[in-house]
Amino acid sequence: MPIKYIKWYNKSMTLQEFAAKRPFLFWSTRDYENLSDEIIVESILEYGEWLDVKKAISITGSKKIAEIFYKKVNSNRHNFDPKVVNYFKLYFNHASRNIN
């Protein structure tokens, strides 16, 4: 099943266009064009599938996704489950070491 929905992915897609293709991740709105990158990344990391995470990284880059993640985690308010926080801290820490 995941292989089938990869077909509509486009390398030049924005996060907002990607959000419009995954409406079940953004149930509070249908105005995808005005969603911030921060809201989209938070929803993808918290509620998305691994292929969604990979696509978000391919759209924006691992460094930008990590920056948004850490900014949200270090703020007073975010919707991340503690297990998600732990997982992505480990993931981005490992990814940053492998970039060099």
Image (spheres, rainbow, N blue to C red):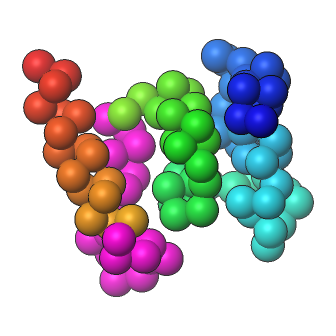
Which residue shows up at 79% across the image and 20% down it? 7
Nearer-the-camera pick, 69 or 37? 69
Q: Which residues are magenta?
A: 63-83
Specify whether residue 68 is painted magenta: yes
- Identify the residue at horizontal 80%, vertical 27% (top origin): 4
- Where 80 sits versus 57, above or below? below
Q: Nearer the viewer, residue 70 or 96?
A: 96
Q: Is residue 67 left or right of residue 94?
A: right
Determine the residue positioned at 27% across, 71% down. 74
Residue sitting nearer the eye, 38 or 1: 1
Q: In the image, is 66 to the left or to the right of 30?
A: left
Q: Is residue 49 visible?
A: yes
Please identify the quarter of the rendering in which residue 81 is found: bottom left
In the rendered view of the protein, which quadrant contains the N terminus? top right
Q: Position of residue 16 (x, y in %)?
A: 71, 42
Q: Position of residue 36 (x, y in %)?
A: 61, 54
